[in-house]
Image (tube, grey):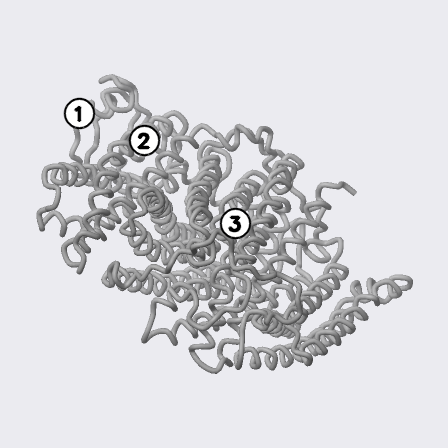
């Protein structure tokens, strides 16, 4: 095994693990902000109890997201050191802005959100919730800007082995960025809605307080019913951008080996790199040209347009894409069916549907990870698309060292994931009753005591 | 000398200083954990930092990406050279970090999270100290690339600096706890603070002798005339501050022990900067050579100048909200 491949596997593994957590915290943070505003508006304690139940799941998820994110900020240097030296001048500042405008804010106000109930007034607490939610979204903004720049690099030029930024506006708002950001934020909100619906379905059918689960179930299903079609639309838009800037990625996604018109839409099959064809393919004739070029004889770029050494791993991209899209449509069907039921019966929901909702929980997360695989594996063999090859930028460390670190992360993440799922289930099973809400502060100011100074604090 | 890389060197140095103090005391709590009397004490100890540790740790991320952005070449070399201790530190930080959330959800398995928190904190401190030692002892670089082996960082000196940082964080942790605890836990904290102060002073003395013996360049920096007259103020100030700290621990002061401990850290840090200046990768790459293009540094600086004051403001406000002694059973969740 060579060090480059192992480093790629390590990056893919740690990134795929990490992304699960922000995906959920973005959505839960927005949900918590809505719950707290409902509580402040109506004064109904019902919403505050909801907040306290969901904030526990949020905190667990946030904790794992933070620690797995710290890993990534150092992995650029440990495993892709030459990438850092060459592209650090562009990617580094974007990541610094993420830390400055998002991480600090999240971390600073999370403490107030979790522990500040009886220390700050309601308005300040609500502000903290809003800022944490804003922080999660801001974080996505910067990281997607950096990632998108690696996909569609503009506004900088490579000179003497270093990227010189020319126009920061162009770099931040690079061509694929707005679409990618929208796609990711919708992925987070949709995945979280499906998660909330699943957990609520469990509480509704099994919990001691069915009314508790019913509210968040109906809310989440309604959200998913709106978000699922929006997400499909956003995905389609991003596909068009990829077609313009990264045609080979799209060729791998579609399994198009030859450039030409009347391209079929390959639904399933096994892309075989050896024979350059799709085995066992199920195709819709001409639909490929129709979707990509909006005409039956539109010429679609195939993988043969470039040298095979510039191909990404076709089977990975091809299949990851189908998993993502398949789950996307599954979530659409599920959310619309759920919304239809919910509209017809106010207080009831078929048992089988509630069980199905629980089984649907992983759908959004698997789709999100699959989507990242499409984006990131599809970018290969480039780290900065069309300019810098991944193989040229890995740190020159012995393969055994990378293998050791990879195995260490795998072992650690298995333990972390097991513990995370265990405690999540524990909180969910405990239901709202186990989540005893603390009393909110009555006054507005924190307890009056000098912060600093004073030798004895008696 | 260009101003911009100098400003950035200052910002990174300041960021590291803030990190060392702020995460230092919460890592210190983990280091003291095994010696605590019982679960009740451990609960209080952990609760003194639960609302703030995450913000403290963010300074580490800031240091990492700040270096990545402003001095990408140095980032590439240092992280290559320090691959193994840094990966170990990251894994240790994972377990330390999740213990905050998981520990309070656990009942039977709480002791496992005590171990994870404590071992994670110790290993993090050890790796940071080793990293520091490895940087001070020098890193082999040819043509802007790391040319050493995977284990160059592992020397008796770096292991010793690793243990020194563990002792230092224990002092920060115990003097932080003095401000935040009461009754028998408070007595224990005073005891722990005195012990860790003694250990730290031994460590500082040994490192102060070992470094000039090991490195002629550092010897030259400190002991040549007239440098000696100016620089000897640093060890003198350290001695005075240590004496003051010992006295305030004896008199059971509440706030001064922490401020003195922070002062000791800052003096040691100043000594470090004096030793390695103007290198960012000691004896190989100066901070000017490692600097990113001006456009990158300016773009980032604009954000810094606007955002850092805001961050500092809400960080102080956050500490103010959670100030005061932590009672047993408080913000249990």
Q: Of discs 3 and 2, which sits in the foreground?
A: 3
At 54% from the left and 73% from the top, the residue drawn is: B181
Residue A23 visible in the displayed image: no
Q: Neighbour class for label 2 at 10 Å: few (<14), some, many (≥20)?
A: many
Residue A19 rendering spot, x and y as whole percentages: 38, 49
Q: Quadrant of the N terminus of chain A?
A: bottom left
| Up/down of B20 relative to B202, above or below | above
Q: Is residue A36 left or right of residue B137?
A: left
Q: N-terminal of the two: label 1 or label 3?
A: 3
Q: CA distance from mark 2 to mark 1?
A: 25 Å
Camera-side residue of B295 and A249 = B295
Residue A269 visible in the displayed image: yes
Q: Which mark is residue A104?
A: 3
Camera-side residue of A208 and A123 = A123
The residue most toward the front is A443
At 50% from the left and 38% from the top, the residue drawn is: A388
Q: Which mark is residue B35?
A: none
Query: In which chain is the residue bearing label 3?
Result: A
Query: In which chain is the residue bearing label 1?
Result: A
The residue most toward the right is B225
Q: Quadrant of residue B152?
A: bottom right
Q: Of discs 2 and 1, which sits in the foreground?
A: 2
At 24% from the left and 60% from the top, the residue drawn is: A431
Q: N-terminal of the two: label 3 or label 2?
A: 3
Query: In which chain is the residue bearing label 2?
Result: A
Q: N-terminal of the two: label 2 or label 1?
A: 2
Q: Which residue is mark 2?
A: A234
Q: CA distance from mark 3 to mark 2?
A: 30 Å
């Amino acid at each position: 095994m060579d060090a480059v491949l192992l480093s790629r596997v390590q990056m893919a593994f740690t990134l795929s693990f990490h992304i699960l957590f922000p995906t959920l915290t973005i959505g839960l943070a927005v949900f918590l902000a809505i719950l707290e505003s409902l509580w402040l508006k109506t004064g109904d304690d019902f919403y505050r109890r909801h907040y306290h139940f969901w904030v526990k799941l949020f905190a667990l998820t946030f904790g794992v997201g933070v620690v797995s994110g710290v890993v990534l900020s150092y992995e650029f240097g440990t495993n892709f050191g030459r990438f850092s030296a060459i592209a650090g001048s562009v990617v580094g500042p974007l990541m610094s802005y993420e830390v400055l405008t998002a991480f600090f804010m999240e971390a600073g106000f999370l403490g107030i959100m979790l522990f500040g109930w009886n220390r700050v007034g309601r308005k300040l607490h609500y502000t903290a919730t809003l800022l944490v939610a804003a922080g999660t979204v801001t974080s996505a903004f910067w990281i997607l800007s950096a990632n998108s720049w690696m996909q569609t690099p503009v506004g900088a030029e490579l000179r003497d082995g270093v990227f010189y930024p020319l126009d920061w506006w162009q770099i931040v708002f690079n061509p694929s960025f707005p679409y990618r950001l929208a796609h990711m934020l919708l992925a987070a909100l949709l995945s979280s809605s499906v998660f909330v619906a699943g957990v609520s379905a469990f509480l509704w059918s099994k919990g001691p307080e069915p009314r508790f689960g019913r509210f968040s179930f109906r809310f989440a299903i309604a959200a998913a019913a709106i978000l699922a079609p929006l997400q499909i639309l956003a995905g389609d838009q991003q596909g068009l951008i990829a077609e313009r800037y990264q045609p080979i990625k799209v060729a791998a996604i579609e399994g198009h080996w030859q450039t030409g018109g009347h391209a079929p839409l390959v639904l399933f099959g096994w892309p075989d790199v050896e024979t350059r064809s799709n085995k066992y393919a199920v195709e819709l004739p001409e639909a490929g040209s129709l979707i990509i070029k909006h005409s039956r004889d539109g010429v679609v770029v195939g993988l043969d347009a470039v040298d095979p050494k510039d191909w990404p791993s076709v089977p990975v991209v091809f299949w990851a894409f189908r998993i993502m899209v398949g789950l996307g449509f599954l979530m659409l069907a599920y959310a619309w069916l759920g919304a239809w039921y919910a509209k017809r019966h106010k207080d009831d929901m078929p048992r089988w549907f509630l069980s199905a909702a629980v089984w649907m929980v992983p759908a959004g997360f698997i789709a999100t990870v699959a989507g990242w695989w499409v984006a990131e594996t599809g970018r290969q063999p480039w780290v900065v698309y069309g300019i810098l090859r991944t193989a040229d930028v890995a740190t020159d460390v012995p393969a055994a060292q990378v293998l050791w670190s990879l195995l260490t992360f795998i072992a650690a993440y298995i333990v972390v994931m097991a513990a995370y799922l265990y405690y999540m289930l524990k909180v969910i099973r405990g239901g709202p009753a186990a989540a005893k809400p603390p009393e909110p502060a009555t006054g507005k100011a924190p307890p009056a005591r000098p912060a600093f100074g004073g030798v004895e604090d008696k | 000398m260009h101003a911009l890389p100098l400003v950035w060197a200052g910002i990174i140095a300041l960021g590291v200083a803030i990190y060392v103090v702020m995460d230092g005391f919460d890592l210190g709590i983990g280091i003291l954990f095994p010696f605590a009397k019982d679960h009740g004490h451990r609960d209080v100890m952990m609760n003194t930092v639960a609302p703030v540790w995450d913000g403290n740790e963010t300074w580490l991320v800031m240091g990492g990406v700040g270096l990545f952005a402003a001095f990408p070449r140095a980032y590439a070399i240092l992280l290559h050279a320090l691959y193994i201790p840094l990966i170990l530190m990251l894994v240790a930080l994972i377990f330390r970090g999740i213990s905050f959330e998981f520990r309070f959800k656990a009942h039977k398995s709480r002791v496992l999270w005590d171990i994870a928190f404590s071992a994670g904190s110790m290993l993090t401190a050890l790796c940071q100290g080793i990293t520091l030692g490895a940087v001070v002892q020098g890193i082999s670089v040819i043509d802007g690339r790391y040319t050493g082996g995977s284990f160059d960082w592992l020397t008796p000196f770096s292991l010793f600096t690793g243990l020194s940082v563990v002792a230092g964080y224990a002092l920060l942790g115990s003097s932080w706890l003095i401000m935040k605890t009461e009754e028998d836990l408070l007595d224990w904290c005073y005891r722990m603070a005195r012990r860790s102060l003694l250990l730290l002073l031994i460590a500082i003395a040994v490192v102060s002798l070992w470094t000039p013996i090991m490195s002629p360049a550092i010897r030259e920096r400190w002991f040549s005339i007239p440098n000696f007259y100016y620089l000897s103020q640093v060890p003198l100030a350290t001695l005075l501050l240590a004496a003051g700290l010992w006295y305030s621990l004896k008199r059971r002061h509440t706030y001064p022990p922490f401020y003195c401990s922070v002062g000791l850290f800052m003096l040691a840090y100043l000594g470090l900067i004096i030793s390695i200046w103007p290198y960012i990768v000691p004896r190989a790459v100066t901070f000017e050579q490692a600097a990113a293009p001006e456009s990158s540094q300016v773009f980032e600086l604009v954000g810094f100048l606007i955002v850092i004051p805001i961050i500092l403001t809400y960080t102080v406000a956050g500490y103010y909200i959670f100030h005061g002694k932590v009672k047993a059973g408080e913000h249990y969740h």
